[in-house]
Amino acid sequence: MAELLFDVTAFDCAILRAAFIKSVMEDNVPEKRWRAVAAVEPDLLGWITRK
């Protein structure tokens, strides 16, 4: 994972996760396209999209 220039809290991640899920649900994006839609750090994306 790349070095972060600022602290990211669990609360920040929860907000990102909720926003991402809401976005893909509202736009009816199939799960197989979630990685293409997201533009975040791959490790963070894995956490956001976990079930």
Image (cartoon, helix red, strand yellow):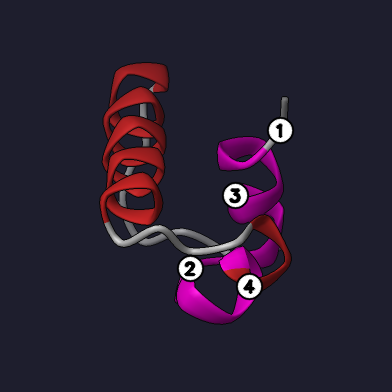
Mark 4 — residue?
33
Is disc 1 surrounded by few (<14), some (14 to 19) or many (20+) residues within 10 Å? few
Residue at x-position 59% and y-position 81%: 36
Residue bearing the label numbered 3? 44
User: Extreme front residue here?
Assistant: 28
Q: Amino acid at mark 2?
A: Val
Indicate whether residue 38 is drawn in magenta: yes
Tell me the residue that label 2 is attached to: 40
Image quadrant where residue 51 sits: top right
Q: CA distance from mark 2 to mark 4?
A: 14 Å
Of pointers 1 and 3, the one earlier in the residue sequence: 3
- Residues under numbered marks 4 and 3 in contact, where contact means CB atoms less than 8 Å apart: no
Q: Is residue 6 above or below residue 1?
A: above
Q: For the residues carrying marks 2 and 1, which lies nearer the camera in this image?
A: 1
The residue mark sitting in front, 4 or 3, is 4
- In the image, 29 versus 49, the foreground residue is 29
Q: Which mark is residue 50?
A: 1
Amino acid on which disc 3 is placed:
Leu
Mark 2 or 4: in front is 4
Give the mark, 1 or 4, whose residue is nearer the N terminus: 4
Q: Nearer the viewer, residue 24 or 11?
A: 24
